[in-house]
Amino acid sequence: MIISPKGNLTWLQVRRYWELLYVLVSRNLKVRYRGSFLGVYWSLLNPLIMTGLYTAIFGATFALYYGNSIINYVLAAFTGLVVINFFSASTSQALSSVVGNGSLLNKIRLPVSVFPLSMITANVFQFTVGTLPLLALMTFLNSKSLVNVLALVFPFLALVLVCTGVGFLVSALYVFFRDLPYLYELVVFVIWLSTPIFYPAAIVPPQVRQFLGLNPLAPIIESLRQITLSGNPPDLGLIWGALLSGVIILTLGWTCFHVWRHQFMDLL
């Protein structure tokens, strides 16, 4: 097979990009967990502690909305917490990734997009090794179906798409606005409150509930809970809604990043 020079160049660029991504992800994980006792499993500690706290405070009240079962409330709170924790950690780390590597970019010609993507990928690895097996076990015990276990990949994929899009967007904005981290902390807090994590969506007034649909994490959590907790086959409508939300945000984030990146070097 004859490969054109243009096609060969494209393949070499793709290969170089993936090798660079692998190096950055490996470096990120080694630095993050150097000397750590539990390693990636520390990512489970926060949602487990918070789940216990929410259950102690709200479990008896909100269990009525989950089949009058404390266990179901525990599982619902846990699934919501792992989603919001993944979103918060991955996008916050991506936010400073371009500016944080500004000195490197001024010395070596590198694809700028690899830095926010490496932060998202490191968190994907952490989630896959630490949290996803526990979710898979919860799903199998509730549904007794391998189909539901395999279907977990779809809401997780939607979550990765959302985080990648937001990561591209905030990392680009941070180049122009250096006080963005303070504002983004507030944005994440608003998203956390407006997402039905520790409370059921049913208690939200109807006139307010319609605005919850604008939250990109809401359909992801809803789909994840349906697969994990209901015991029914995966709801394709919820899955498509979550994936569509992810694709839209990824497209928006990547478009902004691509349009603005030509101005980055003047500001780094």
Image: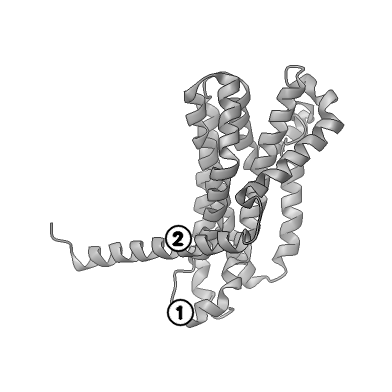
| Cα distance in 3D space between marks 1 and 2 | 17 Å
**Quadrant holding the C terminus:** bottom right
The location of residue 112, given as percent across then percent down, is 49, 69
Mark yes or no: residue 102 visible: yes
User: Amino acid type of disc 2?
Assistant: Tyr
Question: Residue 53 appears in which quarter of the rendering?
Answer: top right
Q: Nearer the viewer, residue 77 or 43?
A: 43
Mark 2 crowdedness (10 Å alpha carbons): few <14, some 14-19, many ≥20:
some
Q: Is residue 13 above or below residue 75?
A: below
Q: Which residue is mark 1?
A: 108
**Quadrant holding the N terminus:** bottom left
- Counting residues from the start of the chain, the first of labels 1 and 2 encountered is 2
Mark 1 crowdedness (10 Å alpha carbons): few <14, some 14-19, many ≥20:
few
Residue drawn at point x = 73 percent, y = 45 percent: 46
Residue drawn at point x = 57 percent, y = 38 percent: 132
Q: Which mark is residue 247?
A: none
Farthest residue in the right direction? Answer: 57
The location of residue 85, given as percent across then percent down, is 68, 47
Mark 2: secondary structure: helix
Mark 1: secondary structure: loop
Residue drawn at point x = 58 percent, y = 45 percent: 127
Question: Residue 207 appears in which quarter of the rendering?
Answer: top right
Mark yes or no: residue 244 visible: no
The location of residue 13, given as percent across then percent down, is 34, 66
The location of residue 68, given as percent across then percent down, is 77, 17
Q: Is residue 51 above or below residue 93?
A: above
Residue drawn at point x = 48 percent, y = 24 percent: 146
Q: Is residue 113 above or below residue 215?
A: below
Mark 1 or mark 2, whichever is nearer to me: 2
Colouring: one colour
Q: Which residue is mark 2?
A: 22
